[in-house]
Image (cartoon, rainbow, N blue to C red):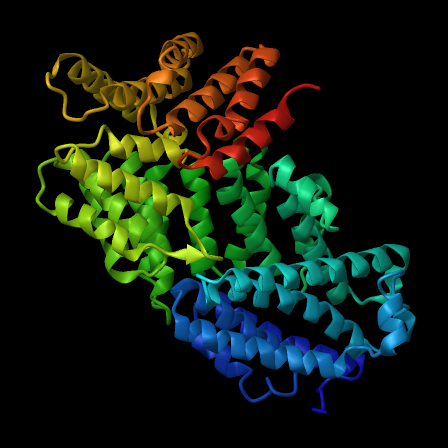
Amino acid sequence: RIQILFENAMELDESLERAKTARDLLLSNRIEEARASVADTKSCDLYAAMVTCNIGFMQAMMTFDRDRITESLAEIDGIIELLNQNRHKDGVLGYVMSYIKNRDFTKFSLLEKHSELMYAEVLLLRAVLTFAEDTDNLVSFLKGAFKIKIAHSLFKELYTVMEQDGALFDEEIQCGIKMGWGSFLLGLSLLPPKLLRLLEFVGLEGDKEKGLALTVEAEEMDKLRSFVIATGILNYQTIALQFIKVDEYDDALVQHILDKYLAKYPESITFVFYKGRRQLINGDIRGALQCYEHCQNVPIDWVQVYHLCYWERMWGHAMLLEWDTAASFAMQLFNESKWSRTLFAYLYVAFKSMADPNDASLVEMSQRCPKYQLKIGGKHLHIEKFAIRKCRSFLKNNNYLCLPGIELLYVWRYIRLMDVNCKKKLVEQIEAALEEIATVKPYYTDHPIDDWFLCNLLLAVIVADLGDVEHGLSLLRTALQSEDNIQVDHYYIAYAHFEIGVLYSKTQQYEQAKAHFRYAKDFSNKVKSYSLENRLLFRIHSALSSLPK
């Protein structure tokens, strides 16, 4: 058994101080210094080991490099062994009874309580890396899911015990419990009802309001883990909600967290990045681009952090209709990042074709697009399937795609954040494309009705966003009259029903809105499957839950 450095409150405080020093270095962009600061104690100090473990996890997920993933897994397995040596032992009978009732934490030492919390935390990291370790293997996926279920049960038990007698746990543990249980409740609540009911059957549960409240409480405790929760809240508010439920975005909360952490870590890439996200959401695209450029100018040990900035700058320039610049960032991602070269290839094709549809590189990149397709849990990624279909369509149809850059801005929900002048320019481009569809004979593709439908869908969303909801409704009704004639891109139909549901909801025609949301939700029963289905289902779940009962 390895001697652990804290057996009492004083030694625990010393351990936490070492970890906080590493945290400060990490948030000051001195990542390798943070790792080095705990190198001498990581074999006998749980919090030092956790710092090393978390840094390795971050690097593995940023690079998606198999060697980094293997190294991180080894570090995690090492801390799991360390934790298991120091977790409370109840014997076989106690293990069996733990499935019937909560354990008696009055019998746990200080070290054992911290070990129990950290064991739940590290299982989550292990689960995520298990998914990434062998992306072609369904067994890896199931192993990861099993670890998530164990972590969920541990956090639920800890939270229940804390609610009954908070004095059993010090504030550091309480902060970690609120973070873990709140994150589970919040994350699971975002899932579509059908999937959530399945998860509830195996004991998992979601509660958005309670989950968000717990994470905010944990962040405000200003403990070691609070910065992790802060980034989680910022990620939820500035990224996740922008895809799922825009009207729940809490700008005051985001500003409060950013002000607090940027005051202490003014050059932190992490918080400057989220400052950029906030500015983007508030329509200050140029200001957001300045934040991302600032991040790229900060020296940092991991160049992969810059890839996040490339991604954001790509979208920012696309929103400004600076298609060539957007394409250049897509190419940088394709050349430097391993996240999804298939997607990056298509993003380049889409944005470059908006700037110069005759560029010679478009054919080459479309041909290369399928070669880098990834698998997670034995399944291909839906967004990569979409990218490959689009590139194949480009090659098949005289090297032509209809407004692919605008389509991507719609799919990623960025059109609503663009300024009025840019939206009006999009309207002009779409109307010009509709004119081509009506007059060019023969048309560029063998499915002009698909392109006509897409143009009407895009135009409806933009004119409604500009304030003419009735015109948007009219365009969508007209388009949906021809839904049975769509030949290739059936996802247009499901998304059009969703968008007309949104507009009916805005005009308080709730029964009609509900009917279209449900049609979109069940659309896969009609066509088996369609592109970008999962991201639409999240939005439908959110939209239905917002309707008056």
Residue 161, quarter of the rendered image: bottom right
Left of 87 or right of it: where is 77? left
The N terminus appears in which quarter of the rendering? bottom right
Quadrant of res 162: bottom right
Q: What residue lies at 18% left-to-right and 49% top-to-bottom? A: 367
Up the image or down, 331 lies above or below 77; here it is: above
Query: Along the line of sight, which residue is nearer the eye, 471 or 31?
Result: 471
Q: Nearer the viewer, residue 152 or 287?
A: 152
Name the quadrant of the C terminus: top right
Q: Residue at x 75, y 71 (%)?
A: 116
Q: Is residue 217 left or right of residue 341?
A: right
Identity of the residue drawn at 34% across and 50% down: 311
Above or below residue 349? Residue 143 is below
In percent of the image, x 59 and y 18: which residue is there?
514
Q: Give 398 or 305, whichever is nearer the viewer.
A: 398
Query: How far across and down, in percent of the image, does residue 87 sit?
Result: 77, 78
Can you give x and y, in whole percent of width and height, for residue 314 in the image?
A: 29, 45
